[in-house]
């Protein structure tokens, strides 16, 4: 038996209030799941039309199952490892604009439509100079969106009450502003007129947003067992973690129209999302990046093993609570709650998150995710954050390319790999040579955007930690640090 409205007695089709660009795993495990909850718990009363943003996609499979699919959420919930599943019933239909362009434009004619949501990958919000209004469809997502909004404007004669709330989920900073900027560029490029431009600016609301949930997608390895457990066939099963966070920056009234908070979801409507983005990058991503070289050289392979290990687990907790949180400006209670959730996510027994997969491009990651914390800590405390400094020393050791007798498969830009290869080749075991090696790495301004040797005491502190790692090995060196 296949999942469909015939096999799912609770099936319900609500008015089509949301247009969604993207039918992939993330949106289905994040946005569409939240809309399903809002429908059931606070009477949002809206369903989603899914638009396939590229030529090859999943809308045929979605339509084949009447928009239904099963979502598995697994991870730590209220302190316990929990695995649960439910059928998501928030998608009404899917449209492929490459074969159904008229149907796509007709969706703009629906008076009840109120929201546009997207996740077209980081490269999706881009201007394509070959796009034309007469294309069916345009190649780029902003091009398709501009054509859609123009059709709505013309359908309703510029009615100021028919504008839409647009919330992109693409993982780029200030995503709503960038999307609006490109749409306005198309307005000029296609000569769509001042009247449309005014309607676009005054009657539509472009929100910036930050999304956070790990979605591992379709469970290929276990789908046979899952099908037996469910008792029906589902070609769109998706798996995600329990944790979710959606920060939406926009006017206060948006949260009344999109009642996610009221439904008990971890959605925050804010006037400025910057502190939340900083919190995520510094705590979640920064902790990952600080952890990797220390834990891997210690002899561990996954994030889960690392937080469960008494020594490395303590190291990463100290990094977060003693060195990252004191550099952030949100309320301490909020920061500590988020940090606790991050550590629970790291300990998720259902996800094998390999340290080497996080280690990709570690130098640039350290610069964007960890270095701001180091510099802010120095500024606020007039001293160096000891554990982050140790992590930086561990990073230099990691790029030596050896864990004991085992070679590390380093993955970074060619100039970074060349920098380290030359630096480590010159090292002959002396203290002076080690200090010179550290000076070379910290002085590589192409990566750091500054000369880190100018940070008071940093060169000496990193050299001292690197000497301890070289002499004692990571296990003894990190124990001594703690």
Image: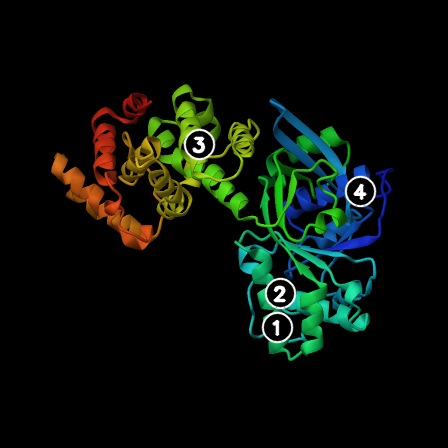
The residue labelled by disc 1 is 186
The residue labelled by disc 3 is 320
Between 325 and 38, the one lying in front of the other is: 325
Q: Position of residue 223 (x, y in %)?
A: 66, 35
Q: Secondary structure at mark 2?
A: helix
Q: Secondary structure at mark 4?
A: helix
Between 268 and 297, the one lying in front of the other is: 268
Q: Nearer the observer, disc 3 or disc 2?
A: 3
Quarter of the N terminus within the rendering: top right
The alpha-carbon separation of the residues under discs 4 and 3 comes to: 37 Å
Between 169 and 355, the one lying in front of the other is: 169
Q: Residues within 10 Å of mark 4 (few under 14, many from 20)?
A: many
Residue 274 visible at all: yes
Q: Position of residue 126 (x, y in %)?
A: 55, 64
* Mark 1 or 2, nearer chain start: 2
The alpha-carbon separation of the residues under discs 2 and 4 comes to: 29 Å
**Looking at the image, do the residues carrying marks 1 and 2 touch, with CB atoms under 8 Å apart?**
yes
The residue labelled by disc 4 is 39
The residue labelled by disc 2 is 142
Q: Residue at x 23, y 24 (%)?
A: 472
* Mark 3 or 2, nearer chain start: 2
Q: Secondary structure at mark 3?
A: helix
């Amino acid at each position: 038996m296949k999942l469909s409205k015939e096999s799912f007695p609770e099936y319900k089709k609500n008015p089509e209030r949301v247009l969604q660009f993207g039918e992939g795993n993330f949106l289905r495990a994040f946005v569409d799941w939240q809309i399903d909850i809002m429908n059931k718990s606070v009477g949002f009363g809206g369903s989603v039309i899914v638009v396939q943003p590229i030529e090859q996609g999943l809308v045929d499979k979605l339509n084949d199952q009447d928009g239904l699919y099963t979502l598995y959420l697994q991870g730590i919930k209220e302190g316990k490892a929990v695995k649960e599943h439910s059928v998501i019933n928030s998608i009404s239909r899917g449209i492929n604009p490459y074969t159904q362009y008229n149907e796509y434009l007709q969706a703009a004619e629906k008076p009840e439509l109120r929201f546009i949501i997207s996740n077209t990958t980081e490269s999706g919000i881009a201007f394509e100079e070959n796009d034309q209004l007469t294309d069916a469809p345009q190649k780029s997502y902003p091009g398709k969106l501009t054509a859609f909004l123009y059709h709505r404007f013309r359908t309703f004669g510029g009615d100021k009450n028919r504008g839409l709330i647009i919330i992109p989920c693409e993982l780029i900073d200030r995503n709503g502003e960038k999307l609006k900027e490109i749409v306005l560029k198309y307005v000029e490029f296609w000569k769509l007129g001042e009247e449309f431009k005014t309607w676009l600016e005054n009657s539509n609301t472009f929100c910036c947003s930050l999304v956070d949930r790990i979605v591992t997608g379709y469970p290929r390895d276990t789908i046979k067992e899952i099908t037996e457990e469910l008792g029906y066939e589902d070609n769109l099963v998706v798996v995600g973690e329990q944790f979710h966070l959606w920060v939406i920056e926009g006017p206060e009234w948006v949260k009344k129209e999109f009642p996610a908070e009221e439904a008990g979801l971890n959605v925050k409507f804010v006037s400025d999302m910057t502190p939340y983005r900083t919190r995520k990058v510094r705590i979640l991503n920064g902790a990952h990046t600080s952890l990797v070289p220390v834990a891997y050289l210690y002899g561990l392979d996954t994030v889960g093993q690392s937080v469960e290990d008494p020594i490395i687990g303590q190291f990463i907790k100290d990094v977060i609570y003693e060195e990252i949180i004191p550099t952030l400006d949100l309320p301490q209670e909020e920061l500590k709650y988020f940090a606790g959730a991050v550590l629970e996510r790291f300990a998720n027994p259902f996800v094998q998150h390999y340290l080497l997969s996080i280690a990709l491009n570690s130098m640039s990651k350290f610069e964007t995710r960890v270095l701001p914390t180091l510099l802010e800590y120095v500024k606020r405390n007039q001293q160096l954050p000891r554990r982050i400094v140790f992590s930086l020393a561990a990073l230099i050791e990691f790029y030596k390319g050896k864990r004991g007798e085992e070679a590390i498969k380093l993955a970074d830009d060619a100039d970074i790999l060349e920098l380290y290869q030359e630096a480590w080749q010159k090292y002959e075991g002396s203290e002076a040579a080690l200090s010179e090696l550290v000076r070379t790495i910290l002085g590589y301004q192409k990566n750091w955007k500054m000369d880190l040797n100018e940070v008071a005491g940093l060169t000496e502190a990193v050299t001292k930690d690197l000497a301890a790692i070289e002499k004692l090995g990571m296990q003894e060196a990190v124990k001594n640090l703690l």
